[in-house]
Amino acid sequence: MQYRPLGTSGLNVSVICLGTMTWGQQNSEKEAHEQMDYALTQGINFFDTAEMYPVPPVKETYGRTEEYIGTWFAARKNRDKVMLATKVFGRSERFNYARGEQTRLNHKHITAALEASLKRLKTDYVDLYQLHFPDRSVNAFGQLGYVHMPEEQSIPFEETLGVLQDLVEAGKIRHIGVSNETPYGVMSYLNLAQTKHYPRIQSVQNPYSLLNRSYEIGLAEVSIRQQCGLLAYSPLGMGVLSGKYVGGKMPEGSRLQLFPYFQRYSKANGERATETYVKIAQGAGLDPAQMALAFVNQQSFVTSNIIGATTMEQLKSNIASINVKLSPDVLAAIDIIHHDIPNPCP
């Protein structure tokens, strides 16, 4: 395994991070424990979860993934072996089942969310607490164009940071990060930390893959110059880049077969790009999924690549991508496709 600094925190996290969002929906508690056991033996010291998980999020399974991690900690007595990251909802009416009203990034909601997560996780602290999505409207979740809403009343960055500062000082959070953020948001948080001595965000968890390289446009430079690296999620585009859906195939029990409304990575240009990426991998003697993951692993602005799996076979293959080094010829071929079909699935 390889390790990289988590921002300026002084912590080193594995380049492969264990994602957990299928646990409690597609994976049982026993399977979740098996995945964590194996990940630890492979040198993975970084696990990522969220109060929202499993996905798709519904009231009936809310918090279940954290519960599975908590029972694993209780059984294994190894909390000190893991850098644990979790997240709090941003602003949303959809998730009002979590706290009985629209979720917000204010004192009431962040404090309640963290206390509930700590209880489920059976721990008294988290290493990285992330804002899952902003309290304001942004161009995220498949939207490239920005639509400004001047009438919108969002929680000020400073207010959110003040709550997080209290929780850091209480010892319940070691470090903080953001997710599904924009260059404006990231720089706003960083500037407040520098000028007003709030906790500094150490990471940005945004989507990044061969099908969505939009992070490179503005945020990659921020990550490098500000030492606030990317925690890349959906590096396989919900499994699309493995090639298992090429040609209209729909494997029984696959994520898109179970949840056909997940269309973010199934657009026409995405399918066309995926077919070509699979051919590049096959021509180079590479597993398509490992090639896609290795591409993410090799980016200088990436701190950690969040992989997820529903089977142990998938998990082992995904983790093994750390040993794959893409040649200049493969990288050149990938860039040709990217220039021809840029960001087909943002």
Image (cartoon, grey):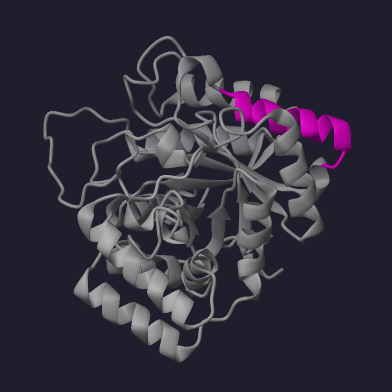
Q: Residue at x 27, y 67 (%)?
A: 217
Relative side of 152 to 69, left or right: left
Q: Is 145 situated above or below 296?
A: above
Q: Quadrant of residue 4?
A: bottom right
Q: Residue at x 21, y 55 (%)?
A: 268
Task: For the C terminus, give its image quadrant.
Answer: bottom left
Camera-side residue of 253 and 322: 253
Relative side of 59 to 103, left or right: right
Image coordinates of residue 12 in percent, x first then y, are: 68, 63
Furthest residue in direction top, as rendered: 100
Furthest residue in direction bottom, as rendered: 329
Asked whether residue 213 appears in the rendered view, the answer is: no
The reply to whether the magenta stretch includes residue 66 is yes
Image coordinates of residue 67 in percent, x first then y, are: 68, 26
Q: Is 259 situated above or below 230?
A: above
Q: Residue at x 22, y 60 (%)?
A: 269
The reply to whether the magenta stretch includes residue 247 is no
Relative side of 283 to 53, left or right: left
Image coordinates of residue 24 in percent, x first then y, are: 61, 28
Image coordinates of residue 302 in percent, x first then y, are: 50, 66
Q: Quadrant of residue 111?
A: top right
Q: Residue at x 80, y 35 (%)?
A: 73
Q: Is 322 situated above or below 40?
A: below
Q: Is 255 situated above or below 95?
A: below
Relative side of 258 to 8, left or right: left
Which region is colored magenta? 63-78
Camera-side residue of 9 and 130: 130
Q: Main secondary structure of the magenta part?
A: helix
Camera-side residue of 287 and 188: 287
Asked whether residue 92 appears in the rendered view, the answer is: yes
Task: For the N terminus, give its image quadrant.
Answer: bottom right
